[in-house]
Amino acid sequence: MRTGRLVKALSGFYYIKVDEEIYQTRARGIFRKSGMYSPLVGDIVDFESDNLKEGTLINIHERKNALNRPQVANVDQILITMSLKSPDFSFYLTDRFIAYSESFDIEPVLIVTKKDLNIDDNLIDKIKETYKMYKIFFTSKEHFDKDLGDIFTNKLSVLAGQTGVGKSTLLNTLLPELDLETGEVSKALGRGRHTTRHVELIEKNGGLVADTPGFSIIEFTHIDKETLKYCFVDFDTPSESCRFRGCNHINEPKCGVKNAVESGDIKQWRYDSYLQIYEEIENYKERY
Ligand SMILES: Nc1nc2c(ncn2[C@@H]2O[C@H](COP(=O)(O)OP(=O)(O)OP(=O)(O)O)[C@@H](O)[C@H]2O)c(=O)[nH]1
Ligand SMILES: [Zn+2]
């Protein structure tokens, strides 16, 4: 028996990478029967293979996480891509992507693009200050290689960010073999191409990267509103002085988080993002 990483799933075949070798396998029957989850790209799996032609996938190791879109397991970092301009930088969207990453216990890394279009250094300072607890890069397409060359090293990465921020451009620069379509015009012609493609993990610097521009629209249907506060890590310390255990920092009196917002230790816009997502989760529950 051997162990490797599932890097591609296509037409009933599972492709497993062990060092530099790729093994083609089919899953043991039990995965097709109910009650057993099916293998996901990113899974660490056990398989048997007598020769290099076709093996059998027999076991999936426990996952540390699994994303829905793209369908990838065991993600180490989500590269949240946001442009400074065109489209304008959005703290709210950034907070959503960060909270989403935190909800899966995946490290968020911020990549702020289109630095060449920025004329507002105050904005850069505000972003740096707001997200000082996270890794953050400011860059532009001419410098993706130089600024982000090591970003994939030894990790499994997935990209995320709203449309037009430069995700495809970034992936094409760092992984030239991909050749994803970029820009609004060419994309309009090839509409839907990315959404129907299967995900494949590409190796780069000893790490793996999902070969898709990732996800731009996210929902919080997978967590309770009471869990959301743990996805805002800057609330952690102030919440220690909340009067009530399990305080949601909404209407409760003597709330350490609300005090911290008032004193400026927690940024008002972070707290506003929290309230907005909290309400959104509340509304899901009414709908379903
Ligand atoms: N000026 C400038 N333009 C950039 C930069 N990065 C990307 N662009 C341009 O922004 C446009 C959108 O880039 P894409 O890479 O297609 O954006 P995307 O995030 O993949 O968009 P979707 O696939 O729609 O989610 C393209 O015309 C790029 O050339 C940058 O750093 N500076
Ligand atoms: Zn509180």
Image (cartoon, rainbow, N blue to C red):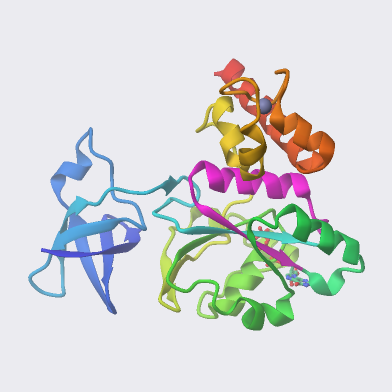
Is 203 positioned to the left or the right of 255 in the image? left
Numbered marks: total: 0
Of residues 81 and 36, the one drawn nearer to the viewer in this rendering: 81
Residue 27 percent location from the top left of the image: 19, 53
Query: Is residue 49 depicted above or below 68 in this figure?
Result: below
Q: Is residue 85 visible?
A: no
Q: Which residues are magenta?
A: 87-113
Picture quarter with ligand 2: top right
Residue 228 percent location from the top left of the image: 59, 33
Q: Is residue 265 visible?
A: yes
Of residues 218 and 91, the one drawn nearer to the viewer in this rendering: 91
Query: Is residue 163 depicted above or below 166 in this figure?
Result: above
Residue ID at (56%, 75%): 179
Could you say which quadrant of the image residue 193 lies in?
bottom right
Q: Residue furthest right?
A: 119
* Quarter occupied by the N terminus: bottom left
* Quarter occupied by the C terminus: top right
Is 224 positioned to the left or the right of 185 in the image? left
Query: Is residue 219 depicted above or below 169 in this figure?
Result: above
